[in-house]
Amino acid sequence: MPSDLTDDELRQLESLASTKRAYRRGDYLYRSGSKFGSLYAIRTGFFKTQVLHEDGREQVTGFQMAGEIIGLDAISTDVHTCDAVALEDSEVCELPFNQLEALSRQLPALQRHLHKIMSREIVRDQGIMLLLGSMRAEERLAAFLLNLSQRFAARGYSASSFRLRMTRQEIGSYLGLKLETVSRTLSYFQETRLIDVHNKSIELLDMSRLLGLVGQQRATPI
Amino acid sequence: MPSDLTDDELRQLESLASTKRAYRRGDYLYRSGSKFGSLYAIRTGFFKTQVLHEDGREQVTGFQMAGEIIGLDAISTDVHTCDAVALEDSEVCELPFNQLEALSRQLPALQRHLHKIMSREIVRDQGIMLLLGSMRAEERLAAFLLNLSQRFAARGYSASSFRLRMTRQEIGSYLGLKLETVSRTLSYFQETRLIDVHNKSIELLDMSRLLGLVGQQRATPI
DNA sequence: CGGGGACTTGATACTGTTCAATTTCCGTGG
DNA sequence: CCACGGAAATTGAACAGTATCAAGTCCCCG
């Protein structure tokens, strides 16, 4: 958060984010089609966002954890365009968007911060497009695990050992793969001592080989 | 653009967007890694944006036409994260971002407009994720053609007959397919009288069947 | 007109999907 | 606390869709 604020400004910001709510696993934070009013700052817990296609297909568009903001998609049309679902018990601060806009008119640092958050989401999405458009299954999984690792590390948790909050199905949806392919690829990573998996607990055993996997069109012969 | 502005405010906005520059086909509007300073409003012409992976792979992340804003990705880190390349001779207005932010602090309507533009980009990206993550080649192409059709129509051009500005290779990169697959699929669409293709000129012959193609897991038997 | 990139088309290879059968995990109720 | 049941995960075999490799043609720009 921006740090060069007066006490009064800080108080305004705090009051904006005062309503903290708890969600149980499986609860919806919002649903596609519902009216937009607020952004949400995740305090603790883990969420997924997904878009549903009329024919029943669903695409997981992201996994969000503590410190991240969700709901940005809805600003466009005042209607949420995806579902946000808690993958574990979570706490969330509601940020009424009108108030956020008003306050950011007075606080350039907040304004800039908001813009950066939205832009970061755009950059993140571009990365996923690259992944979905040009990587093979192994690369996708490697990139996915490394991304989680980084984000856990940034929050002070272990970078090499963590629990997946999502199912193979959800990982597959996010990565454009079937759950069987996710499972097989994880098993293969395990066989080759890249990682250690037991159900949802993951340990990254060889970061550098994982990093090497991402950004390799294929094993270069010779 | 927001309409409820005073004359003075309108003048400010206009002066902001005063510098119109021309680009030739193949010119870069900006490059990945270059310093961010401005957003760009396309007045006429056609652009692509692409991200490059260190290993040489490239992913086209979008095709932009008149009336669209590009450069939003760079707000996040003050550095452009993709290239923007003109696919035909084009005219572009530069919008210095500092000035845009300052002005939008004074003009709530402009502020809201900017937020909507950024949010719309996020929603667009989600749509591409859905496409890349869960559609088959035919669906992707159909969705792509219908999207172009819509956007041309919104600009007063024919919805059913237009010229592709990009190569098969670029379409393929955007859709996560190889150029041969793009070519084959277009040929197949032609055989089945869905469209008429001759090189870069496209005519959509059967919109409803195209629409039917998008959002079909596969031809449902019975 | 010539040349080079863009496009088309065919044959083959391969990655990931589909379908199916087990096994494992975990929450719930006896 | 243990047993049960359903969801989640693993694994195998056959298959489908797309990529790859390879000609060959077309188109456009100079």
Image (cartoon, coloured by chain):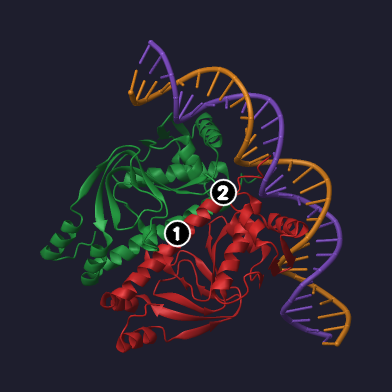
Chain colours: A red, B green, C purple, D orange
Q: Does residue B21 appear left or right of residue B51 in this picture?
A: left
Q: Secondary structure at mark 2?
A: loop
Identified by mark 1, the residue type is Val
Count of labels in the image:
2
Residue B162: % across, % down: 36, 36
Q: A103 or B85: nearer the eye?
A: B85
Determine the residue positioned at 36% across, 71% down: A113
Residue B78: % across, % down: 36, 61
| Up/down of A17 relative to D20, above or below | below
* Mark nearer the viewer, 2 or 1: 1
Identified by mark 2, the residue type is Met
Q: Chain of mark 1?
A: A
Residue A143: % across, % down: 60, 58
Determine the residue positioned at 62% across, 63% down: A145
Q: Does residue B87 appear left or right of residue A70 in this picture?
A: left
Q: Farthest left residue?
A: B7
Q: Secondary structure at mark 1?
A: helix
Pointers 2 and 1 in contact (C-beta within 8 Å): no
- Which quarter of the rendered picture does the C terminus of chain B lie within? top right
Is there any visible trace of residue A47 in the rendered image?
A: no
Q: Chain of mark 2?
A: B
Task: Identify the residue position indicated by label 1 in the image.
Answer: A123
Q: A18 or A190: nearer the eye?
A: A190
Is there any visible trace of residue B23 in the rendered image?
A: yes
Task: Identify the residue position indicated by label 2 in the image.
Answer: B135
Determine the residue positioned at 58% across, 52% down: B134
